[in-house]
Amino acid sequence: MKIEDVVCSFCGCLCDDLVVEVDGTRVVSVENGCTLANEKFLGDHRLKTPIRRSGNSWTKISYEEAIAETAAILLDADRPLLYGWSGTFGEAQSIGVHLAEILGAVIDNTSTVCHGPSILAIQEVGHPGCTLGQVKNRADVVVYWGANPVDAHPRHMSRYTTYCDGFFRKDAFKERKVIVVDVRETESSNIADEFMKVNPGGDYAVLSALRAIVRGKGDIIPARVEGVSREQLFRVADICKSAKFGAFFFGVGLTMAPGKNKNIRNAIELTEELSRHTKFTISPMRGHWNVYGSNEVFTWISGYPYAVDFARGIAFYNPGETTSVDILKREECDACLVVASDPGAHFPKACAEHLARIPTIQIDPHVNVTTHLAHIQIPVAVAGIDAEGTAYRMDGVPIRTRKLFQGSYPDDLVVLEKLYAIVKEAKG
Amino acid sequence: MRFLLNTGRTIKQGSFVERKNNPSYQVAAATILMNPVDMLEIMVEEGNHVRVKSDTGEVVLQVSPDNGLTRGRVFVSLGPYANHIVSPETHGTGMPDFKVTPVSIEPTDDPVLTVSSLMERCGGLPYED
Amino acid sequence: MPGLLIKNAFVIDPLSGVKGEVMDIAIRDGKIVEDVPSGAEIIDVRGCLTLPGGIDSHSHVCGTKVNFGRYMSPEDMRAGRTARKGVMHVTSGYSVPTTFGNSYRYSTMGYTTILEGAMAPLEARHTHEEFTATPHQDMLANTLFDGNWSIMDAVREKDVKRAAAVVAWTLAAVKGFAIKLTNPGGTEAWGWGGDMSSVHDTVPNFDVSPAEIISTMIKANELLNLPHSVHLHCNNLGVPGNYRTTLNTIGLAPDLNKERQSLYLTHVQFHSYGGTTWRDICSKSEDITMAINSRPHVVMDMGQIMFGRTTTMTADGPMEFKLYKLHHNKWSNHDVELETGSGIIPVYYSRKSLVNCVMWAIGLELALLTKNPWQCLLSTDSPNGAPFVKYPEIIALLMSRKFRENERKMIDQRTEHFVPLFAIDRELDWYEIAVMTRAGQAKALGLTRIGKGYLSPGAEADVAIYPIKPGEIDPSVDYQQVVAGFSRTLHTIKRGRVVARDGEVVVEGANSTIWSRAHVPPEYDMGKDPEFIKKFEQYYTVRMNNYPVQDVYLPRGIRIETEASL
């Protein structure tokens, strides 16, 4: 059976035009997908049953056992951390926040090591953005800064920017200038009209230089700024200022580099400065397909997009303190529930060591790096393949993922609702 | 020799995120990209192993050349190998310094550990499916 | 279920013609009934003021921009927080509370129905997700058409029926309630950094004017026989001298509907400014209310501002950028492809700012100078003028000249030279307040057909009982008691069940979402129209199949069906 308009649950592009052929409970072909989508849909490497570590061996256990023991661990914990959430759908994330609320836990999502600094910047200066269709239909200048879409968001350029014709851009590839700013050459920089190579850690200064030029203070710019020539800075500023519609996209190359949230603040303020001359927007290249959904769901329930601590009864938010890496580094949490992400792979070693030290439970369809650190893992259906629910694209557009077949795994929502019911019963 | 380590997403790493016990994931995550001249300098060839040390820790990786890298800079895909040398310090932002870790690199004959043995060293128990 | 009997209620029920009588109200199976059998639960309210559940006809509580207001404002989240307690979830936020925060605070003020003022169709699913997390109120969504390409194409071709067909398809797809136009044409112009400066300006590339969009949509709305009229946020919001644009807009409205208005103007305070700059801005409330008083087919809401901190948020992206350039705080913007825009900035309305004082006076003047309370409904365009928790103070200001005089001493002393407020003696009475906070909304939104806004048998049993004994207090003098009384009900009853008591929410709640489905002849089904489909194929970034909001998002949807006259 061929299913059309399938939503890809890999990256924040949330492409919704895949055609997937399914035979029973197996995906046999994928059309329109990128390499990452093909791997995701065609790959079938699931953990078969819940597993538990007993001393130096792993044993298979039932779902009931696994969920009951997870509830017991979380109820027994003084400072539980509920981490992940970006790889599942909104309805499950919502139960996660309520679970954290009732447990007095900290709940955090993968933004914490991705676009958390962007959120901090937005909380300082706001975010002039737009949906991706605005860019597709209008933009004549696109800037990728600290982002490598060819590798991380493979269809971003063909669906929304460089290669994508729009209403006011009938021949996008010719009409649209692409500027790439990065510390290294990448597949993306190779196809740029203008590549601005910045010294590592030099983004803040380069952004400041561009702001100065746009403001008419170009005379203070030295011959070189962090590896970029004065001539190139003026040229780039001029391209941006003379754009009819400019779209700035930034990646973790800015959020993880020195300056972090201040880099993003500077980029947003550059966008704001450009908005006084022409139309300009800025957007983060969100990684996980539904990381933005986790920010949205956390926010409407708790008021904060990530790093929410319910230990005081109220929702408390203080990134740097209530963020997962900091909590794990301080060896503060005494149990951790990981849902739909892989901190074992993506957190520094000290954090992985603490995850191994405490009872860590993982709810995830696949064996990943965290599996080796966990006490229990509960496999679930894959959202977008055999589970469905709401996801938020990197620009905030909500799309419902599809369930392509009825498989044998429960989905995140089913498992979390059972867990929540036990915890609620115990907490009264 | 001292280098500046950058980490980030790659399409290979992305392709194997749901198969992290797979040797291909290990290759994607345990490869260090270097400028070919730097490789000459420390006398390693493509596929050779190097020990990469930072103030935080050390890990053995295999080398691959990348002409796009400026001399003195190296790149490792984000993942458990890179995270053996990235500091957990976040400077109050929640975000570690994934992009600028000073490291030293030297050739070694030691093997590149599998993902599971890497985690075993962190206190975990390898799960082989 | 034997039912519920509210005894000794001092009832004001304008739609049923009850203007203040002590009586009993019987409730069974979620409805008001003639009587209940013995054994029914009895609540003796001892002469307390009993009104139909409050209805807010324009508030921003759910959806993309509201949530972004929270997301970007941890300082606002910290400014209002409560811990989990009983059935109540944690809440955060003062001007943009979390969904549960909104729901509990509205509920303890006696509100049982809220219309979200602006939903971008492309992002409707988000609004509906938040609706289900706002469990104590029935929810409705104004659906934005101000910059809709298919609508502007139809307007240019002078094809009212096609515009109606686009509306019918879209409302059904996104489960929207009514047509909202926010700065018509202006949001599309903002896609290039521009705006509309009058109703006769031309939208770039589309060759239509705001006036043409408004006129066409008023007619299209009536062709579809929708419950509500066109709900309009005029062009030039917040600009000195904009009252002319507002008067021109009012002049565009024909009288096409016997049951209700043909045009609803929202937050008119922001559109009633005279003068030419921020230095000489003055009130034009007299001109505006004169126009409204002579046109019974136009209804407005106040858009009152109250002093203090709040967050402004609107689909009017260009306006927010102008405001940002004045305030220099933080600015968010979010344009939505082929449809609309939005912007958010935090503001502080200060008693020390002459401009803010003039704005404050204008809102009150609109209510006091509109002769018929059914034509001027109470609102703050929450949170734009102030968060809705300020409604009780506004009620008290409208009921007490003394309160207004006391405020006069606290504000910029030059204010009185720019506004007529302090020359107005009128004090509204309980009946007028009941009209302006529920009955008028029910009529204007067309919700009486589903039993909202009144308390006679057959109505939905949404009831608010306030700790106010109208015979015993003089609101003109005891205005603080009015504020306290309207801040916290004795009982809020939603669909026959007590949901809040003495300021505490007592049940988890389960609301409904109300939407409009206009049936059109097959030749007007845009789902089969090649031009319309092409917009999805070529210009939207979401496939047409993935665009409609699935039924699963409306677990208790109430569909208002109409037959289009096409």
Image (tube, rainbow, N blue to C red):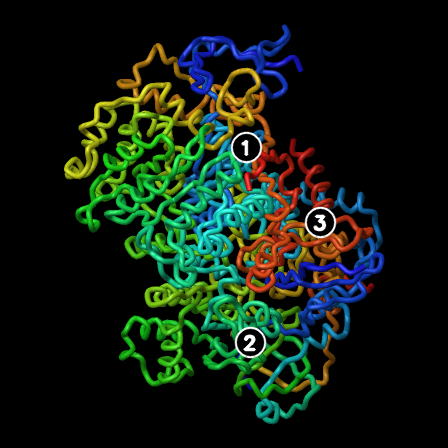
Query: In this rendering, does residue C171 appear at all?
Result: yes
Q: Residue at image x 48%, y 81%? A: A193
**Is residue A179 among what the camera can see?**
no
Q: Position of residue C145 (x, y in %)?
A: 47, 49
Q: Nearer the viewer, residue C506 or A3?
A: A3
Q: Which residue is mark 3?
A: A412
Query: Where does the image place residue C401, in percent across and percent down from the top left?
Result: 24, 24
Which amino acid is tagged 3?
Asp
- Residue C71 image offset from top left, x and y in percent: 48, 50
Chain of residue at mark 1: C
Subunit under mark 2: B
Q: Residues within 10 Å of mark 1 (few under 14, many from 20)?
A: many
- In this rendering, which labeled residue sits more in front, label 2 or label 3? 3
Q: Nearer the viewer, mark 3 or mark 1?
A: 1
Please give the label number shown on residue C138: 1
Task: Tell me whether circle 1 and circle 2 mark residues in contact (CB < 8 Å).
Answer: no
Identified by mark 2, the residue type is Asn
Query: In 3D space, how far apart are the residues under numbered discs 3 and 1 (Cα atoms)?
Result: 29 Å
Kind of residue at badge 1: Asp
Q: Which quadrant is home to the C terminus of chain C?
A: top right
Q: Where's residue C118, x and y in %?
A: 47, 45
